[in-house]
Amino acid sequence: MSDNPYQNDRGNKDRSITKDGGGTLSAAQNDPRQSTGQKGEPFLIGDAMTGGYGKGPDILHGCTIAAERGEIAVIVGPNGAGKSTAMKAVFGMLNVNQGAVRLDGEDITHLSPQERVVKGMGFVPQTSNIFTSMTVEENLEMGAFIRRDDFRDTMTQVYDLFPILKEKRNQAAGELSGGQRQQVAVGRALMTKPKVLMLDEPTAGVSPIVMDELFDRIIEVARTGIPILMVEQNARQALEIADKAYVLVQGRNAHTGTGKELLADQEVRRSFLGG
């Protein structure tokens, strides 16, 4: 049996955002950041968030998104719907004027993004998400900046997940293809041993083949019990792997359900998936 946690069974279940549950293995096990979760609430939740950037108008209006352990939750919707804004609100990059963000039962609404990383959030932005002049391995080492333990086992796990990165570990990250750069970005986030992984448009600008490969790796990460919250423009493909999905329109929840439920919903298909 392999020691690589990215090869364990996933154990996902469809559930509403109000139910507890989760995967069979939590990535936070044996982690000093102990669980404080409250039964009946999702592991990660942005609850009824209203807010926007600085002193500008609100972009989100009572928006709720959540993810359980071992679950892939995706946010889809038309351009300008507030998808990335909702993700950034959960990560603390804009003001939440109403509502709250809770991680493992702890209210983190007023923490900075840096403080949320320490609490266990791994965030991969859509652009400018690697250090191009550094090697692949140096990028991964930068991801372990909050670690005070030996992170070599985690790096081995990342290389097992993304074998091409091990092959190119001494190459400048800026010389890699777009898909390989995304693997570096995700790998660096995993080096923090996150309690939750957040991905903003991880397949933007990559070929369909590379997109499928990235989605396969995302599924493998979810198998470890890490909740994944993902904004994705390729809605149909994202819904196919989603345990929970949110369709946002103008900063509000328009549809919520499992990926399969939304793929089968005629209104969702007609309005957002091209029929």
Image (tube, rainbow, N blue to C red):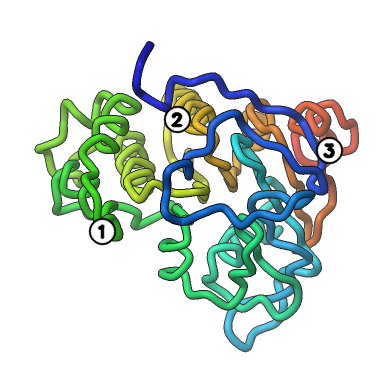
Residue 73: percent from left, percent from top: 65, 41
Residue nearer the viewer, 116 or 50: 116
Answer with left or right where residue 72 lies relative to residue 123: right
Q: The residue under label 2 is which amino acid type?
A: Leu
Number of residues whose C-alpha sits closer than 10 Å to that of mark 3, classed few (under 14), some (14–19) or many (20 or more) = some
Q: Which mark is residue 214?
A: 2
Say which amino acid is labelled 1: Phe
Numbered disc in front, either 2 or 1: 1
Per the image, the residue denoted by label 1 is 145
Give how far apart the Cα atoms at labels 1 and 3 are.
42 Å
Cα distance between the residues tagged 2 and 1 = 25 Å
Residue 125 appears in view: no
Tell me whether circle 2 and circle 1 mark residues in contact (CB < 8 Å): no
Q: Is residue 121 above or below residue 137?
A: below
In this picture, residue 143 sits left or right of residue 233: left
Q: Nearer the viewer, mark 2 or mark 3?
A: 2
- Kind of element beneath mark 3: helix
In the rendered image, residue 61, in percent from the top left (x then y), is placed at 79, 69
User: Which residue is depicted at the point 75% across and 63% down?
Assistant: 47
Residue 96 position, x and y percent, is 66, 76
Q: Earlier in the sequence, mark 2 or mark 1?
A: 1
- Residue 142, above or below 140: below
Report the side of 123 relative to 132 (left or right). right
Residue 224 at x, y percent in the picture: 49, 31
N-terminal label among 1 and 3:
1
